[in-house]
Amino acid sequence: MSDRKPAGEFLDAAIELLRQVRDEEAGGIEAAGTLLADTVQNGGRLFAFGAGHSSLPAQDVVYRAGGLALMNLLTVPGVVGVDVMPATLGSALERVDGLASAVLDSSPLRAGDTLVIISLSGRNALPVEMAVHARALGVRVIGVTSVAYASETSSRHSSGTFLKDHCDIVLDSRIAVGDAELTLDTVPAPFAPASTVVTSALMQATLATAAATLADRGVEPPLLRSGNVDGGHDWNRRVLEQYADRIFYRR
């Protein structure tokens, strides 16, 4: 094995990306967090969606200790993760026109809600159509994507546009096209993706902003606590009952 330390190199790359989003996406994070706080305060509901591995940061903020109880997962059968067999079906479904509209029309989303759409490339039909149709329904849309894909790849949506073109707020993950941070002469392909680390951090930073914004306004943020701390279950029961009409993962 060479003297290179891939583990350290990957962690350094991830840390540098986190520094970039901290410094360069601060305004977007503030705006996105404020929009979530506005939605909560105005009686709206919160939803997050991601396809494939982009579903992981969406799942990470749903029914999560320390997170907002009102964040719901919007699911599209077959594209949420690698549990579908064959796993390649999920990738194919992301390119199907009309699927997002059908899902939204049968979902609980309504005008006044906010939907976070996570798509690393933002080029497939599913996230683009979802953003377009959601906004047509009166839903505010936050897109979490890598803007670089729009200049280095082509859209797979019939409009020729990307997710970033149809959002009220865009958070740029700064991930390079291909999502691989390391290369080695002995490895024929680049490797070590960092998109999940960075996108999850963007999501948590946004929700932290939302919680603090609500508190600054004198509104108790509807936060969940860990069920593994004393009193956690009682706390969560109160929050879940108080906001039962805006929580869909219990139904």
Image (tube, rainbow, N blue to C red):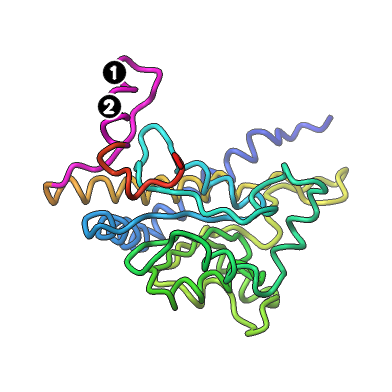
Query: Which residue type carries mark 1?
Result: Gly
Q: Nearer the viewer, residue 26 or 76?
A: 76
Percent coordinates x, y for residue 111 in the rendering: 35, 69
Instruction: Tell me where the magenta segment starts and ends, as one range.
Output: 219-240
Percent coordinates x, y for residue 161 in the rendering: 60, 80
At 32% from the left edge and 30% from the top edge, which residue is drawn? Answer: 236
Q: Secondary structure at mark 2?
A: helix
Q: In the orientation shown, which residue stands out farthest toward the bottom?
A: 159
Q: CA distance from mark 2 to mark 1?
A: 6 Å
Whether residue 62 is situated above or below residue 31 in the rendered picture:
above
Choose top left, top right, bottom left or bottom right for residue 138: bottom left
On the image, numbered disc 1 is attached to which residue? 231
Whether residue 24 is situated above or below residue 223 in the rendered picture:
below
Q: Quadrant of the N terminus?
A: top right
Q: In the orientation shown, which residue stands out farthest toward the left?
A: 218
Percent coordinates x, y for residue 158 in the rendering: 67, 83
Choose top left, top right, bottom left or bottom right for residue 192: top right
On the image, numbered disc 2 is attached to which residue? 235
Whether tag 2 and tag 1 are in contact, CB under 8 A, the answer is yes
Choose top left, top right, bottom left or bottom right for residue 157: bottom right
Percent coordinates x, y for residue 194 in the rendering: 61, 47
